[in-house]
Amino acid sequence: RAGVPQVMLRDRYAGAHTPDTATRKAWTAVSFRADTLALADMTQPGKPQSGVRGVTHALMIGGGVPVEAAGSLVGAVGVSGAPDGKLDDDCARAGLAAIEDKLAF
């Protein structure tokens, strides 16, 4: 929940940028307590929240999803490598759904 990476899983064919991008998406989701797909929309140029795009390390592209357990933010998942952020977001959510029963601690 402090934005410190715990696990990195990378496909051997994933682009060289994907580990850093996934980490930054997770960091952004946990830091702003919101998924990065929503943040990407809320921070478009011209919108009141657009200034947060200048925060060092923040990445407003879909694929970062906060993780909650027992009503508390416990971390975030970051996914990178799909052709667009919506697909990365879908992958992150599918991963969380697969372990949902293990998050009820």
Image (tube, helix red, strand yellow):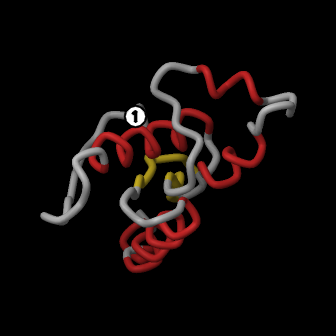
**Crowding at mark 1 (Cα within 10 Å: few <14, some 14-19, many 20+):** some
Q: Is residue 105 left or right of 62 when viewed as pictured?
A: left
- Say if 54 sits above or below 35 in the image: above
Q: Position of residue 3 (x, y in %)?
A: 40, 34
Q: Nearer the viewer, residue 40 or 103?
A: 40
Residue under numbered circle 1: 3
Q: Quadrant of residue 2?
A: top left
> Circle 1 sits in a helix, a strand or a loop, which is it?
loop
Placement of 99 over or under 3, stated as above or below: below
Residue 104 position, x and y percent, is 45, 68
Relative image position of residue 48 (x, y in whole percent) = 86, 28
Residue at image coords 64%, 46%: 34
Q: Height in image: 76 above or below 82?
A: above
Amino acid on which the number 1 mark rests in the picture: Gly
Q: Residue at x 29, y 45 (%)?
A: 17
Name the residue located 42 percent from the left edge and 66 percent from the top edge. 82
Which residue appears at 52% of the width and 63% of the height?
Answer: 84
